[in-house]
Image (cartoon, helix red, strand yellow):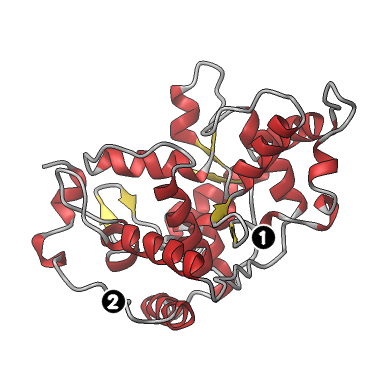
Amino acid sequence: MNKIALVISAALMVATPLTSMATPDQDLKAFRKHFTDKFPKIPFSDFVNGVYAVDKASREQWEAFEEFPSYEPYIDKGKVLFDKKFANGKGFADCFPNYKKGIRQNYPYFDTAKDEIVTLEGSINKCLTDNGEEPYKLKKGKITYVGAYIAYLSRGKKFDIKVPNDLGAIKAYNRGKEHFYAKRGQLNMSCADCHYHYAGNHIRADVLSPALGHPTGFPVFRNKWSAKSASGDGMGTLHRRYGGCNKQVRAKPFKAQSDEYKALEYFETYMSNGLEVNGPSQRK
């Protein structure tokens, strides 16, 4: 068994705390209460900082990193890409006219007309292809730079994701919810095992982050990703992180922007309603 299995035992074979019959609003209240009860000394607004909200030693290291944030150059790169005109004379501003006011907090959302979840990364690439440009890779690189710039301009805006009273939207929300609590991989573990039930606990030297606030800081710069990159580029999307988590429990990851990961993002972001955008951010 690997290091995760050393901490998470068979005792986690418990029922999903959010019942399948509950409404999204009921789920949200229960989810939020779970974490505010578990960490009563942490201000609700601080859950945007992930593990750094619940572990003092990690927070001290993170605050030192934040003096000279590694993600800062990628905000600048994102601005250059955002401002660059496409071959047809248009640019990202034509697709995101309200970007200066902040738009990150509006994603993902459910498009009832198209019966699908719309993510920020999906919208960035749609803007490119609609204007005759090649789409960006979905997990790292340029898509994270543009995303970092958009997120930076959206800092302080609160997430208020909606689940419309629409069969497709409710189905998509429940798909994400089920994904969060479903066991998978050789280690037979779920997202909830680490980030709901055991949030704040140690796995050897690491501390498990609370799921509340997970999406707020993306795209993120991870020291781990930077160390593996020849260029030192450690930026990645939320779906890149999902894939890494699946690999850790020895499950085959889904593709970035797959229906599975979009639904999971939809659920997790809805569960983080009321928290502010603080992306891009830095993580271990």
Q: How many numbered dots are placed on residues in this image?
A: 2
Which residue, given by chain and number where applicable, does mark 2 sit on?
A: 17
Q: Amino acid at mark 1?
A: Gln
Of residue 6 and residue 16, the one placed in the foreground of this image is 16
Where is residue 19? Give x, y as percent. Answer: 30, 78
Tag 2: Cα neighbours inside 10 Å, few (<14), some, or many (≥20)?
A: some
Where is residue 50? Give x, y as percent. Answer: 48, 58
Secondary structure under the numbered disc 2 in the rendered image: loop
Identify the residue at image location x=54%, y=33%. 138
Residue 43 left/right relative to 251:
right
Res. 6 in view: yes
Identify the residue at image location x=10%, y=42%. 1
Identify the residue at image location x=67%, y=68%. 158
Identify the residue at image location x=67%, y=38%. 126
Residue 98 left/right relative to 211:
right
The residue lying furthest to the front in this view is 113
Q: Quadrant of residue 165?
A: bottom right
Secondary structure under the numbered disc 1 in the rendered image: helix
Of residue 239 and residue 76, the one placed in the foreground of this image is 239
Which residue, given by chain and number where applicable, does mark 1 sit on?
A: 105
Where is residue 234? Give x, y as percent. Answer: 53, 31
Determine whether 29 is above or below 52 in the image: below
* Quarter of the figure with the C terminus: top left
Q: Amino acid at mark 2?
A: Pro
The residue lying furthest to the right in this view is 89
